[in-house]
Image (cartoon, grey):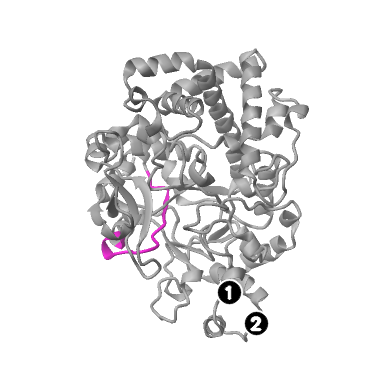
Amino acid sequence: MNDLSQPAISPFPQDYRASGLLLHITSLPSPYGIGDLGPTAFEWIDRLHEAGQSWWQALPLGPTGYGDSPYQCLSSFAGNGLLISPHYLIEDGLLREDDCKGAFSPTAIDYDVVIPFKQRLLGIASTNFQAGVRKDLRPAYEEFCRSRARWLDDYGLFRALRAKYNNAPYLQWPKELVERVPSALAQARRDLAERIDEVRFAQFLLFRQGKRLKDHARANGVRLIGDLPFFVSPDSSDVWANPELFLLDEHRRPRVVAGVPPDYFSAQGQLWGNPVYNWAAHHRTGYAWCIDRIRALLAHVDIIRLDHFRAFVAAWHIPAAAPTAATGQWVAGPGAEFFNVLRRELGALPFLAEDLGLITPDVCTLRDQFQIPGTRVLQFAFDGRTDNLHLPNNCQANTVVYTGTHDNPTIREWFAELTDRERRRIWSYLLRAEGEIRDAAPELIRLAWSSPAALAIAPLQDLLNLGREGRMNIPGHAKGNWRWRATQHMLSASAFQWLRNLTEFTHRSGAVRFSLEEIAS
């Protein structure tokens, strides 16, 4: 166990150099309408390995709710059942091939079609299991339910009730269920026992397939980066089951909600609407819920990107009735105490900090105190200021540099929308003659890989030099996001050989080990 009097240790050793790609699991090719944990995910890891990449970064893995967003999950602990591979359920004997027939777009996810399709398959698999198919899995399933009962029982009931009430937000359920009256919960568990078992079994299947994939990644020298949203969805089992951990009123509604204040990009700020934490209550429990949340994700990944890192120092609290984010105030977060507790409980800090946006000196101090690598994004680098932290020559070693994130346009789309003056500034920084729009993505990947950052990452869309058609998410747009999918042809593109050559040239290949393994040993 770490001595807390000693400095924290970065997850990356000194002089560490590696690279990887950003691609959400749902964006993988699959015959079932959405990317999953099936054979194509294994092929993707093999492709990363062949291209000399050491890291695969995905988006949050939880069950999606509002807008199908992975950042609005119905639980911080459960996984997304849409990621379960029907291929492996057929292999397990829990489904037949005839059960899984369907017609889907190979380039976009139609959630209105995919969600009922996958739910039907999981219902069949659960029925077959309860009928005695794969009896050999019963001990493992029962142990899974016992070891995760702390969150799984509430999540199973939450999903069963949500289905009963036509997916209405839980605040619209009967009052005795909203307020978790014990007798009402007990009756609901009896009435919905079959549906609860189906939810739990789906989680068992998901964790089982996830472990299989993680083991394959490790065997091939690829490590997985997960993503942990700072806030939770207002309509989640987290808030319903743990109201004391959030700032709610007597009717279980948020008193204040999360967002960010007005800035250069938004005159009214951003009103996210998530409930905010009651940090005093978390402190009294030794941050047990937070620790459990992190451990649940670490079952699937090796390192976690902490979204909205600045909120550990202070978050923007907005009155629940406010029409915009302009009337909020900064309220202190748990700060260093939280990370000291995590070091004591986890023995290491397997984190990356998403420290973008309005970053004050105290946020940098907290990040650096625990040597958590920060984030740099090349699309933010070229504003003409020589002290811009996102410029590679200002980049420190203990950072992760991205060409862009899931919220950004692709490099090709971004570059096409720049002014001629802005483009000339980038070509000048690259010390080369002006090129075509199609030249920007490979040049910025080369720039990221050549930077001093310990880790360089590009979205697959940038490697493939896609334009607007490759956009994953447009912040502020509630519909049409999270739908992009790669085709099988894209994963066999010659770009991967180019990436391997670049990775070898910039000395980022072969970086299999990282210091967390040494800490754990």
Q: Nearer the viewer, residue 455 or 203?
A: 203
Task: Examine the rendered structure and indicate whether residue 240 appears above or below residue 335.
Answer: above
Residue 369: horizontal and vertical position, in percent?
Answer: 30, 57
Magenta stretch, residue numbers:
348-364
Res. 205 image quadrant = top right
Q: Is residue 133 left or right of residue 357?
A: right
Q: Which of the pair 123/3 is nearer the observer?
A: 123
Q: Which residue is mark 2?
A: 435
Residue 514 location (% of width, % of height): 49, 51
Query: How far apart are the alpha carbons under marks 2 and 1?
Result: 11 Å
- Which quadrant of the rendered structure holds the C terminus? top left
Please tell me the numbered disc located at residue 176: none
Task: Please identify the quadrant where the N terminus is shown.
Answer: top left
Helix, strand or loop at label 1? It is helix
Vertical comparison of 89 with 489: above or below: above
231 on left or right of 251: right
**Is residue 37 visible to us here?**
no
* Residue 137 showing in the rendered view: yes
Callout 2 crowding tier (Cα within 10 Å): few <14, some 14–19, many ≥20: few
- The residue tagged 1 is 415
Query: x, y percentage for residue 308?
Result: 38, 54
How many numbered markers are drawn?
2
